[in-house]
């Protein structure tokens, strides 16, 4: 896709030169992400999952959602080289996809995006519930684990409709069942509505409720069961980051759907701009898989200690680890 051949005959020399510069910049950022972002995403997301699962008894409700987002980040990190070095990057493709493999990558990407967006939205709503009613256990760890399971199941079911559109757009038109389902724009429209508009409204609604309740001074503010204040900073930072990195992707899907629904042919300049925006937004979406665990590591106060205990446990292996001398001195004192 990252080619300026679509502009031949539709743009002057300056347009061709600008396209080549943008192509070069986007290719450089893609290589940088493949060299740095993918290893960081794989390593940090794996450590986030292992450190929290190693101490499941100490996990809180936000930890469960971040583990869920880390698992989606692992999927995105695995798919990133397949997409950035695949046939969509025609200038440097290392291999070619069959239609089935290409559809599989698209569906898995959609599943990971749905899990990420809905985990962020439900994290916002549950943080509001925990902030307003800390002793109701409506947002307990037990319930959150089941909710995360439903998120993955719902993402698979939602992607099934998109899968049908993608498959029918690649098979022969003689199949009667697919004769009316050969437009991928319908699948894009479904993803924009279900994967972006719904969770975005939920996130904004939760943030408004949290901002209102923080202005009120109630006796519940002294409750020992209330979440740590750092969780709210982590929540706001996570919502802003996920919203900022995923919005361009869904906006390009919406723009492509609107342009194709008009029934008019798209000229080379508009098509080239749309494809460039689509590839740039897809790169930003992939980068969320490496940004999220770094943000979690920076703001969450308990994660470094969990990570140290995990590393210590891995170092000791099956042997019993020596007791922590600092902890023993504290208990003795």
Image: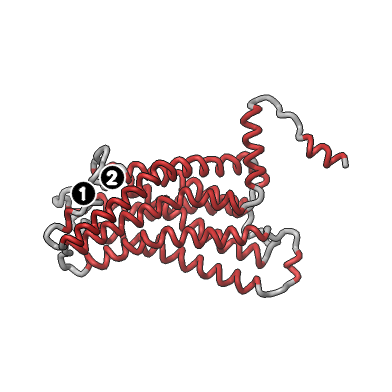
Whether residue 165 is visible to the viewer of this picture, yes or no, is no
Label 1 environment density (alpha carbons within 10 Å; few <14, some 14–19, many ≥20): some
What residue sits 20% from the left and 61% below the top? Answer: 15
Q: Is residue 5 left or right of residue 76?
A: left
> Label 2: which residue?
102
What residue sits 19% from the left and 58% below the top? Answer: 16
- Res 305 → quadrant: top right
Single out the mark in the foreground, 1 or 2. 2
Q: Nearer the viewer, residue 159 or 4?
A: 4
> Is the residue 301 above or below the residue 277 in the image?
above
> Label 1: which residue?
170
Q: Position of residue 55 (x, y in %)?
A: 65, 41
Q: Which mark is residue 74?
A: none
Looking at the figure, which quarter contains the C terminus? top right
**Alpha-carbon distance for marks 1 and 2?**
10 Å
User: Tag 1, which secondary structure?
Assistant: loop
Can you name the residue that lies furthest to the left here?
A: 9
User: Tag 2, which secondary structure?
Assistant: helix
Whether residue 313 is visible to the viewer of this picture, yes or no, is yes
> Is the residue 304 above or below the residue 226 in the image?
above
Label 2 environment density (alpha carbons within 10 Å; few <14, some 14–19, many ≥20): some
Q: Is residue 254 left or right of residue 233?
A: left
């Amino acid at each position: 896709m990252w080619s300026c051949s679509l502009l031949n005959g539709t743009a002057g020399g300056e347009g061709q030169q600008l396209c080549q510069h943008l192509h070069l910049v986007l290719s450089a950022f893609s290589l940088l992400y493949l060299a740095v972002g993918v290893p960081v995403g794989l390593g940090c997301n794996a450590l986030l999952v292992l450190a929290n699962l190693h101490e499941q008894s100490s996990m809180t409700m936000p930890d469960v959602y971040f583990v869920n987002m880390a698992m989606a980040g692992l999927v995105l990190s695995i798919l990133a080289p397949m997409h950035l070095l695949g046939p969509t990057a025609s200038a440097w493709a290392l291999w070619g996809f069959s239609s089935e493999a290409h559809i599989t990558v698209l569906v898995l990407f959609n599943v990971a995006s749905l899990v990420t967006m809905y985990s962020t939205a439900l994290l916002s709503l549950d943080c509001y519930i925990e902030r307003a009613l800390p002793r109701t256990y409506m947002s307990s760890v037990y319930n959150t684990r089941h909710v995360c399971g439903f998120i993955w199941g719902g993402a698979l079911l939602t992607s099934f409709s998109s899968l049908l559109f993608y498959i029918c757009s690649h098979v022969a038109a003689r199949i009667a069942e697919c004769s009316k389902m050969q437009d991928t724009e319908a699948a894009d429209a479904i993803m924009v509505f279900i994967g972006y508009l719904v969770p975005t409204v939920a996130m904004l609604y939760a943030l408004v409720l949290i901002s209102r309740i923080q202005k009120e001074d109630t006796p519940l503010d002294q409750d020992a069961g209330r979440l740590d204040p750092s969780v709210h900073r982590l929540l706001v930072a996570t919502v802003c980051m996920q919203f900022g990195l995923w919005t361009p992707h869904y906006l390009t899907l919406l723009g492509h759907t609107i342009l194709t629904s008009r029934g008019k042919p798209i000229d080379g300049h508009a098509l080239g701009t749309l494809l460039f925006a689509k590839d740039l937004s897809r790169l930003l979406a992939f980068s969320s898989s490496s940004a999220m665990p770094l943000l979690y590591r920076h703001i969450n106060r308990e994660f470094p200690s969990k990570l140290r205990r995990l590393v210590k446990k891995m170092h000791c292996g099956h042997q019993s680890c020596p007791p922590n001398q600092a902890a023993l001195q504290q208990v003795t004192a």
